[in-house]
Structure formats: C-alpha cells, structure tokens
Amino acid sequence: MFDKLAAIERQYEELVQRLGSAELQSEPAEYRKQAKALAEIEPTVQRFREYRDVDHAVTETEALATGSDLEMREMAQEELKDLTVRREALVADLKLLLIPKDPNDAKNVILEIRAGTGGDEAALFASELFRMYTKYAEGQGWRIDVMSMNDTGIGGLKEVIAMVEGRGVYSKMKYESGVHRVQRVPATEAAGRLHTSTATVAVLPEAEDVDIQINDKDLRIDTFCSSGPGGQSVNTTYSAIRITHLPSGVVVSQQDEKSQHKNKAKAMKILKSRLLEIEQQKQQDAVSKDRRSQVGTGERSEKIRTYHYKENRITDHRVNFTLYRLTDVLNGDLEEVLDHVITYYQAEKLRDATGVS
C-alpha cells in the first residue's frame, strides 16, 4: 500500500512542476486536464504526508517512553496513545482513498423492478420492493419519477421503471442489482405452505449525452395507440413509442404520457442508460473476467438476497449478512444492509487495487 502511495506522491510532484511550466500554461485545454488530475490525487498525497509525520512522531515518542526520566516517560506514554490512534485512523483513511473511484457514483439512476418466478406472489413482491426503495429514497431526500408501470390489478407489479434523482444515488444503490427472493406463506395458501418467489432489480446509472452517442440511423421508432388508464386520448392517438436500437437489439417501449414527445424523451433516457450499462460491462469484462465484484460481471442472474417473512429475516448472500428486522427494512430502513454490502465491495476493490486486505 505504501509503495502505491509513494508512487502517487511522485506523480503529484511531477504534475506540480508541469503545471508551473510556461509551455503547459500556453495550452488551456491540456492545462485544465492536468490540473484536474492534480486535484484528484491531492487529498491522498496530503493524507499520506500527514501519516508520515505522525508515524515519525510515534517513533520519536516511543524512544522517550522508554527513557530513564520517569516524568518524561509517563508524558510520552500518554502522548503515544493519542498518536497511535491517530496513525490508525490515517491508515484507514488512506485505504479508502486508494479505492478506485467509480465515475458513476454521483449519477442519478434508472431503477427497474420486474416480477420473476411465482406468478401473482412474484408481482406482489415486486410491488413491495418498489415501495421499500421509494421509502428509502424519501428518507434520503431523493426524488422518484415513475417512468413506466405495469400492474396486475390486485396490488402487484409486473414491471416498474423509475428515475431516482438525488445526491450520490448510484453510489448507494448500485449493488442492489440482481435476483431478490421472498419466502412466505401467501394469503391464499390454505395449507400454510411456504412459497418461494422472485423479482429482479436493475440499477442503471443515468446516461448523459457525453456517455452515449446514438445515431438516428441506428434507431427504428414505431408509434402505436396507448392501452390502459389515460382518459379519452387512450386508443385514439398514436402517442405510445417503441424504440429499437438496431445494432444491439435493445427495445424500449413507453406509453405513460399522453404526449408522444414526452414518451419518446423518456424512452430515449432509458435506452441510453441500458446501452451505457452494456458498454461498461464490456469494458469491465475486458479488464478482468474473474472480477468478483457483483456489478458489471454478468452475475445479476444470481440470487443476491432472501426476504424470509416468517422469521422476519433478511439475508444478503454475497456478504453473508443476516438481519432480523425485515419489517423495518421493507419500510425503507435499508441503511444497515446497504452499508454492509458497500463496505464488502470497497474492501474487494481495495484488494484488487493494492493487494491490501
């Protein structure tokens, strides 16, 4: 870890020298690029230098703490306790600073939830998951905009797609993608037998225009009459939109709005986010086929979490974490579960980056 930090410090010093050169200052675009690179590593270098100062102070104080002067020894031993605590805290900070930054962390997300195996029970569970995330988002001060919803008429959801906007949404939500399993006795089950159903969750970072460029010639856009609630305009105007991205085969349909223009805008937003996810997964797979991180590895078909109603239990299988507060979690109290998952994957990324566990 410290070899890595020393290399970052050398890079920092080189950037400082480069930014001071008249040659670089005469090229505004390159100067901004190098200045940004400097700003990104400066907090790590400052913390590393602080660590070295404290580590040096520990060494000096240890010598005083074993000296012959009793009064000085006692003072040094007391000071050594504080310095040791400070040094440990700086090591913890440095480990976090070395974790590779995810460029998507600050982005809004498109949340997609779909009923899996289990019929009506799966649809009801999908609805409960959406309510859970909605409650959690409200507690975080985030905004949720439902872009598309397909319900069952008995309180369940076959599918829901929503935009979640707020500070650091993707950084908190990105590990929720996968298969969520519920185990409970359905209200319609006379014999009281436990049923297992599933729902799938996808969390996609919102794609910006700079992330994904789409050529119009690569799109096939079909219009059709809306179906379902919507008043007098339903089935009378071709306001619904279906966009097919020909190179990838990705298809997005949108009909929630009465305006064809609004439906197209929403459909394009979803399409860009799905294409961004595909592209990022390709890049990550090219770097390492064996990466253990859940996001971007194609492991989303795997069961990531079980919700067991009878035992009031929620278990995240990726991090081997169990919490007996299922009712609270379903009411939006997700913080403890998410913290365990995020901490686990941060440790994985740190190990990949530095070999430090």
Image (cartoon, rainbow, N blue to C red):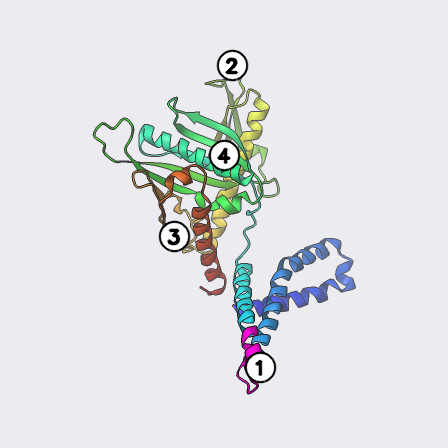
Looking at marks 2 and 1 on the same chain, the residue that comes earlier in the sequence is marked by 1
> Which residue corresponds to the image point at 61% horizontal and 40% vertical from the top-left?
209
Q: Nearer the viewer, mark 1 or mark 4?
A: 1
Which of the two residues, 111 or 271, is positioned nearer the viewer here?
111
Q: Nearer the viewer, mark 3 or mark 1?
A: 1
Identify residue type, mark 2: Gly
Give the residue pinned by disc 2.
231
Give the residue pinned by disc 3.
319
Give the residue pinned by disc 4.
246
Residue 133 horizontal/vertical position (percent) = 46, 37
Q: Which residues are magenta?
A: 62-79
Q: Nearer the viewer, mark 3 or mark 4?
A: 3
Quarter assignment of residue 123: top left
Residue 94 horizontal/vertical position (percent) = 55, 63
Q: Which mark is residue 71?
A: 1
Query: Across the whole image, how many numbered discs are drawn on residues?
Result: 4
CA separation in Å, label 2 and label 4: 33 Å
Identify residue type, mark 3: Val
Looking at marks 3 and 4 on the same chain, the residue that comes earlier in the sequence is marked by 4
CA separation in Å, label 1 and label 4: 80 Å
Residue 236 horizontal/vertical position (percent) = 52, 13
Quarter assignment of residue 326: top left
Which of the two residues, 33 or 65, is positioned nearer the viewer here?
65
Residue 200 horizontal/vertical position (percent) = 39, 38
CA separation in Å, label 2 and label 1: 86 Å
| Left or right, residue 132 beside residue 68 | left
Looking at marks 1 and 4 on the same chain, the residue that comes earlier in the sequence is marked by 1
Q: Which mark is residue 265?
A: none
CA separation in Å, label 3 and label 1: 50 Å
> Which residue corresponds to the image point at 56% horizontal and 45% vertical from the top-left?
168
- Graded by Cα atoms within 10 Å as few (under 14), some (14 to 19) or many (20 or more), the crowding at tag 3 reads some
Residue 66 among magenta residues: yes
